[in-house]
Amino acid sequence: MTRPVTSTVTGSVEATPTIGAALRWWARRDPDAVAVRCAGRVLTRQELEEWSDDVARRWLAQGVRVDDLVAVALPNGLEAVVAFVAAWKAGATPQPLSPRMDPADREAVLAAGRPAVVLDRVEDVPGPPDGPSSAPPLPDLAASCWKAPTSSGSTGCPKVVRAAAPARVDPRARVAPFVPRSAVQLVAGPLTHAAPFVYAMRGLTTGHELVVLPRFDAGEWLRAVARHGVTWAVLVPSMMHAVWRHPDRARTDVSSLEAVLHLGARCAPWLKRAWIDWLGPDRVHELYAGTESQGLAFVDGHDWTLRPGTVGRPLPGSRFRVVRPDLSDCAPGEVGEVLMRREHPTYGYVGAHPLVRDGWHTLGDSGWLDADGYLFVGDRLDDLITVDGTRVAPADVEAVLEEHLCVRSAVAVEAGGTGGVHAVVELVDGTPDPHDVLATWCSARLEPVARPVSWTVVRDPLRDDTGKVRRSRWRPGSTASGRITCDDHDQ
């Protein structure tokens, strides 16, 4: 639903400008300002304007129509940004698609969305024009849906998520209360994932300079902050863990950072405290939301320090409930299923139906509300492990394991056979099998029911570039590779 505003393009009162018009306004206002940096390449706002116009003209000539999908399965780089912008200018909807998606999932997603264009290689995006075009201006088009990302698939088959909002934006206004209107934004995650795509692209429309990493690396993240004067960054907890442990962190100048926003997964309390101690509570923000944006909760470092573990209170327009299986409301502090809703529709699935309970949406998370309305999130309900009648949250076990200096990442799942918790640990390079050390570490920090009874040691990354993992793949008996497995009962 659009709202009447004073147009930043014409000065008249009309519908919110299209995304293409908003970017054109920035290019005219400051043509030589940097729009995107990536791997030593730089694209100014005027260069972005000319390149994306050229690509959009080609697609329109090939028959791309308003509201078509353009699937972009490209690595981070200038071409990916140009492709997204060109899609909007052609009146199409960008469909970010991970290049590393499982082939069967990819086939299902493409079959559901039926995009008019699929970009799999950097070469699929025509190179920049030699100079300004003499072609007539592009028509000012806006798709009825500004994005159609794919859900992470961490709890099942990925789904195409069509945003309810059209491809329009006011370039002078904040995209959200927690997003600065202007910033040097560091993009560390893959642009084909929902969160990095949203904050990078919406930031671009309001004047952000994007510093895009080809792929996340903790050392490069720190160097980029210092080199480019980064003022705002979005991370997931696995990235925070890697940055915190990096040997260059303490000697890197990060004074330009005004704030970091973390999301995407539950953050271990010890890690959150470490970042607050490092940057200060004013500069560490957290958002709880799904790809579908059915509800938004936000907390800054000050509120979190007063209520460790909270993901905050609902932002304006969002509401949360925590319910029992019969959908009755839980008492403050009582664990149940987290439900949410927004004042207006935010999404629709392609080829799937939303999970709605009594008019409320769910991500399938457990959690609770305190007496002041602050939300606390446990773990996915489907991932909870029942041990001797007690439900154990895998994230609690993973947080304890990842605090150990020899562990880069951890996953907790249900053990086979006699039951209990099975731990999968990704070790820091060069670390010998630490089974006895980690068992002792857990014994001092976890209740008996939450202590792992069996272990798998891996040397390859457990989580993808977005910090996500499908825990089901690591349950004993699955076909995950690179394992060294041992069982407490055999020690």
Image: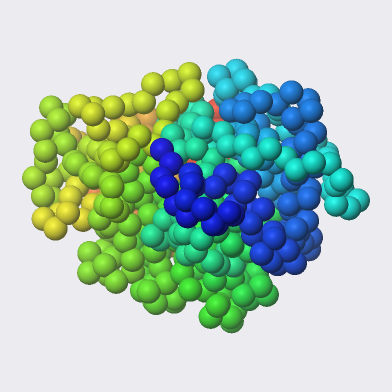
- Quadrant position of the C terminus in the picture: top left
Q: In front: 282, or 241? A: 282
At 36% from the left and 74% from the top, the residue drawn is 281
x, y (%) of residue 90?
68, 35
**Measured along the vertical axis of the image, is residue 32 above or below residue 94?**
below
At 28% from the left and 52% from the top, the residue drawn is 316
The reply, left or right, for residue 189 in relation to residue 444 is right
Counting the numbered discs, the total is 0
Q: In front: 68, or 21? A: 21
The reply, left or right, for residue 245 in relation to residue 377 is right
At 44% from the left and 76% from the top, the residue drawn is 279
Residue 63 appears in view: yes
x, y (%) of residue 317?
28, 47
**Measured along the vertical axis of the image, is residue 280 above or below residue 4?**
below
x, y (%) of residue 446?
28, 54
x, y (%) of residue 333?
13, 50
At 42% from the left and 56% from the top, the residue drawn is 176
Q: Quadrant of residue 382?
A: top left
Q: In front: 139, or 92? A: 139
Q: Quadrant of residue 386?
A: top left
